[in-house]
Amino acid sequence: MSKFSRSVMDRAVYGPLASQPKDRSVMLGSLFGEDIALVDTGSSLLASHVDPIVGAAEGLGRLAIHVACNDLAASGVRPRWAQILVLTPVGGDDLLKKVMEEAVAAAKGISVTIIGGHSGYTAALSRTLAAVTAMGIAQDRVIPTGGAKEGDVVCITRGVGLEGTAILAWDYREKCRSLGLSDSDISEARALADELSVVKEALKLASLGATAMHDPTRGGVLEAMAEMAHGADLSFRIDQASLPVPVVVERFSLAFGFDPMRMISSGALVVTLPQDILERARAELQGIVSLYPVGVVEPGVGVRLTSDLGERLFESPEPDFDELARLQVDLGSPEGT
C-alpha cells in the first residue's frame, strides 16, 4: 500500500474536511504529516491515531498494534487503549483468530488494552486487512512531527529497513532462497519483527526534551525525515554513511534490489534533539536501544543526503512512493495465501 500524494490529499481529503462545523474541543485535527488527533474531553486531552496494515500476511495482528501505538508514542503520548478492525476473505474464521491472538499478545507487551473494534468477512478481499485505532491521554506536552529546531541533531534508533525486511522474510521465504539468501539470513530477518515497538524509547526521548519524532512507516526513514523537515520549514542535512543499516537488511536490499532508506521501517524512530541533551539521551537509552546521530537541522528545505559522491536533495515528501509496495507488485500475493 502507498499513501496518496499531497495534492490528492488537499483536494480529496482536506478540502471536504474544511467544510465541517468548527468544534472547539478539537485541539488538533487532520494535518498533513501529523499523525495524531487531540480532543479536549473537559477533564483530559485524548490523543488518537489510526493505521491500517495491508502489506503483510504473517504477523498481521502484531504489526497492526505496534504501528498504531508507535505513532502515538512518537507524539509523546503513552498508548493505553486500542480498537481493532479485522476483515478477512470468506471463510476466514481461523485467520480472524490468528490475527486477534497476535494483536492481544502484542498489546500485552506494551501494556495496552484492546477495548473493542469490528470484524467481518467479504468476497471483495483476497487477503486479510487489519486497522487499529490507538488512544491515550496526553500528559505534559505533545511532540509534533514538525517541531524540529535549527541546530538540532537528527538521530535514528535501532536501524533502517527493519519492518520491510521482516515482511519479505516472513511472506516470501522461497523467493528469498531463490535470490541466494540463506536460511540463517531469513531467520535473522524474521527476528526483526520482534523489534518493531518504539514505545519505550519514544516516551523516554519525549521526557528528555525531543523536539520532534516520527515513526518511519511507508516510504521509510527518508519519507519520515522529509515530512519532519517540511513541517518545521527547515532542512535536514544527513550523512548517508552514518545511517545504521543492519547487516541483514543490507543483504536483503542487495538481493531484492531496494533502497533501505525508502523501505518501511517501523521499529526505528527518527528524532530531533537539542545538541546539549544528545549525550544524556544516549546514556539513558543504554540497555533499551541504540541512538545514532546522523545529521543536523539547518535553514533550507527538504532532506539533503550527503555522501562521497556529493549531495542529493529531496525537496518535499513523496508519500505515494514506497519500496515494499513497489516490490509486491512484482512478487504478487504472499506465499501460502
Image: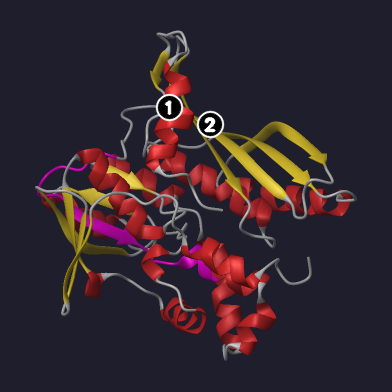
Residue stretch rendered in magenta on the structure? 146-165
Q: Is residue 160 magenta?
A: yes
Q: CA distance from mark 2 to mark 1?
A: 23 Å
Q: Which residue is mark 1?
A: 14
Could you tell me residue 155's position as x and y percent?
A: 26, 58
What amino acid is found at the position of numbered circle 1 in the picture? Tyr
Do we see residue 182 in this rendering? yes
Going 59% across and 45% down the picture, which residue do you hit?
Answer: 52
Mark identifier at residue 88? none
On the picture, is 223 further left or further right than 337?
Answer: left
Going by the numbered disc 2, the residue's amino acid type is: Met
Lower position in the chain sequence, tag 2 or tag 1: 1
What residue appears at the point 46 percent right and 83 percent down from the top-left corner?
251
Choose between 75 and 312: the one closer to the eye. Answer: 312
Residue 289 horizontal side relative to residue 48, left or right:
left
Callout 2–callout 1 Cβ contact below 8 Å: no
Q: Which residue is mark 2?
A: 135
Where does the image place residue 166, in percent across and percent down from the top left? 56, 69
Name the foreground residue: 39 vs 197. 39
Place residue 270 in its image quadrant.
Answer: bottom left
Residue 26 horizontal side relative to residue 273, left or right? right
Q: Nearer the viewer, residue 140 or 130?
A: 130
